[in-house]
Amino acid sequence: MRLISSTNEPLGIVSFEQALTRALEAGEDLVEVAQNATPPVCRVMDFGKFHYEQAKRQREAKKKQHQHKVKEIKFHPNIDPHDYQTKVTHALEFFEKGHKVKASMFFRGREMSHVELGRQVMDRFIKDTAEEGAVESFPQQSGRMIVMLLAPKIKKPG
């Protein structure tokens, strides 16, 4: 097997027993790096320290990821103008924080016979939030509700 030191210096091709004794003399572990290579490559290193540093790098990478949350706003077709404006304001706040917004229109009882009123409210909502948000999935009706998804617009620096 090909042996590499902890300082990445090649130590040549040695037998498994010789590699193990060198690792024990150095007070470190013998770790197989490339098993499919001919001959297999092993490295003398402190495996606990290596494992800790690898986990630390993964945690750092995870911190830099941005997770999008989806906030839901619920409507009915006969919504009061003030209530509607409040929901638009909430949606704009969600966009500023970087969240997506799921807008749901629910129909109760006889409201199902006036689905076009619900569509008008959804279209008005798209128009009122167009400055901050973009439609990701257009309004789709499924059963007694219409659902659409809006995402915040990417702001260009400058």
Image (cartoon, rainbow, N blue to C red):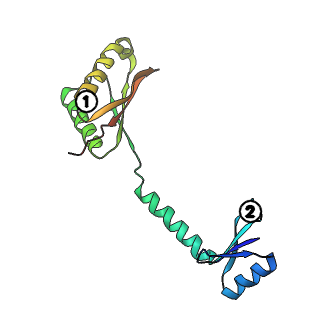
Q: Quadrant of residue 121?
A: top left
Q: Is residue 144 visible?
A: no
Q: Quadrant of residue 35?
A: bottom right
Disc number placed over residue 130 in the picture, else none = 1
Disc number placed over residue 35 in the picture, else none = 2
Residue found 30% across the figure and 37% down from its top: 153
Residue toward you, 14 or 126: 14
Q: Which image quadrant: the C terminus?
A: top left
Residue found 63% across the figure and 75% down from its top: 47
Q: Please, what is the three-letter code of the amino acid marked with disc 1? A: Ala
Q: CA distance from mark 1 to mark 2?
A: 56 Å
Answer above or below: position of 1 versus 105: below
Answer above or below: position of 144 versus 20: above
Q: Please, what is the three-letter code of the amino acid marked with disc 2? A: Gln
Q: Which image quadrant: the N terminus?
A: bottom right
Horizontally, residue 104 falls left or right of residue 125, namely right
Q: How many marks?
A: 2
Which structural element holds mark 2?
Answer: loop
Residue found 74% across the figure and 60% down from its top: 37
Answer above or below: position of 9 versus 35: below
Residue toward you, 26 or 129: 26
Q: Quadrant of residue 113?
A: top left
Disc number placed over residue 83 in the picture, else none = none
Of pointers 1 and 2, the one earlier in the residue sequence: 2
